[in-house]
Image: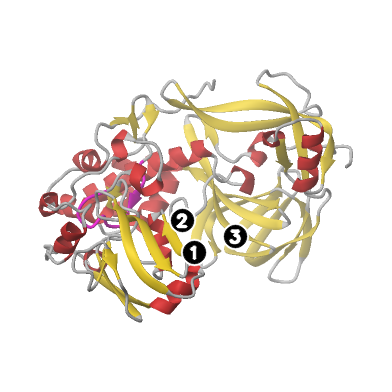
Amino acid sequence: MRKILILLSISINMLFGAEIRDGTLFLEINLASAAELRIEGSSFFLTENNELFKQDCSGEVTCKVVSQSTENQFGIISRIDSCSGYDESEAIINSHFIWKNGQLALKHEYWFFLPHSFQDLAQAQAYATAIDYPFSSIQSIPVVNSTLQIIQQDGEISFFESPLKIYSDEGLWINGLPYEGEFILKVRNGKLVLNHLLPIEEYIAGVIPNEIGNYSPLEALKAQAVAARSHAISLLLNNRHSKDGYDLCNTTHCQVYKGKHLRNELIEEAVMQSAGEIMVINGKVADATYHSCCGGKTDSSQAIWNGAYIEHLSGSICIAEAESYSLETEKGVTSWLNRKVDTTGMSSWEKNTLNWNRSISKADVANKLGLKYIRSFEVLERGISGRVTKLRIVGDHNVTLDSEYKIRQTFGMLPSSLFVFIGSSGKSVFHPAKTINIQGRGSGHGVGMCQVGALRKARNGSDYLSILQAYYPNTEISTQWIDNEGP
């Protein structure tokens, strides 16, 4: 145990990335995290947070952490105060977003810590237990003022204190992809964390071509833009990456973001025509999760993720012909998978989501589940989309999988859990041979907007608002969702 060190010169924006500037939401999107990072650009510059020192750069630059002025630490919060006027040497300022009165607001809190810090979580937990404090009061304290070594292409070496700001109007290449604008370089858990700090509309323009395709019909792109914008706000409110040093990651865990990659005039038009629009329901932002292909019907979030009932994520009909099939039964799913679906106008990737087959050895499945042998599979539950949500495997002992994602993983990461075992003849119990053959349809979890369905509806003349209503019923569009004043 040691006396808690300093920490409080950290600015709000360095601890928590998202901010509101003149009515515009800015987000920190993580681009890379490693012990050593390489950045390339024809012209850019680095500056410390106080902007007193500036370094012009060109070509490839290598960034490394060479020392840390403080070790990773955990502190115990004694109290939280929302009042202003405290000396920064007394408290850490914690800023996070909340949803209040139908708007997104930035809330500032002052965290006061007990006068001790700990090098690892176990030590902090032991002390909290001894003094009867809950584990929820334990907070990881960010490491600041780490020394970074910057090595330019000509061999020139410079040293800076983190965090660093990076600016480039001409563009940077990071992991082979182009980006431009403002960047933040931090240190978290001994690694460099490189984030893109940008307005939300720029972020959306970098998401939609990588999620639904850059030459999709305009109305489908606009629907994707509104869904992605709404989903981003939901993720921001959940603070899923707040301890990682950024707001959102650039992968499917949040949304796929690749900067200028695949952007074109059609993407710019879709973002411009839907600018600032998000979906709300019952005074709250509507989580607008989406997926590649439902396979006929979308499913409920409650069935797929074992959560609470959510009105606008309760499932809908995507392909009209699927309505007459009871996809919660084995016979209904088998019949539906054997029915051909019209694929007129679809791209190859769309067609591939509607009919697929996979094979995996029984031994591989047994090994993944820690079984010596497998006697049978029994489908216990399916969602309304036909996705298997609960599966029992009978072997030397029984294993029950109760998540569609775990089920997909078990059989070699299937595109979706909307499938049947070939040879099951519409029965819920299947006794496999050495090789397990699977027939399926759809791609992804099946909740929210079906991207293949959105593309089909757009080609058939639907506008983006009707597409959104089909997948997120009873939601409304809002453009006045940013609180410039704060709570």
In the rendered structure, which disc, 3 or 1, sits on the residue that comes first in sequence?
3
Q: CA distance from mark 3 to mark 1?
A: 16 Å
Residue 377 at least partly seen: yes
Q: CA distance from mark 3 to mark 2?
A: 18 Å
- Look at label 3 and name its amino acid: Ser
Q: Which mark is residue 177?
A: 1
Location of residue 392 in the rendering, given as x and y in whole percent from the top left corner: 38, 60
In the rendered structure, which disc, 3 or 2, sits on the residue that comes first in sequence?
3
Element on which disc 3 rests? strand
Write the residue at 52% across / 57% down: 170
Out of 320 and 57, give the one closest to the viewer. Answer: 320
Magenta residue check for 290? yes
Residue 113: which quarter of the image? top right
- Look at label 1 and name its amino acid: Leu
Out of 267 and 333, give the one closest to the viewer. Answer: 333
Furthest-bottom residue in this view: 434
Main SS of the magenta part reads: loop
Q: Magenta residues, as a range?
A: 288-298
Write the residue at 33% across / 49% down: 290
Do the residues under discs 1 and 2 have CB atoms within 8 angstroms? yes
Q: Is residue 171 left or right of residue 276?
A: right
In the rendered image, which residue does mark 2 sit on? 259
In the rendered image, which residue does mark 3 sit on? 43
Write the residue at 18% across / 43% down: 463
Q: Is residue 46 left or right of residue 42?
A: right
Furthest-right residue in this view: 2
Write the residue at 27% across / 67% down: 349
CA neighbours of label 1 inside 10 A, class few (<14), some (14 to 19), many (20+):
few
Location of residue 257 in the rendering, given as x and y in whole percent from the top left corner: 45, 55
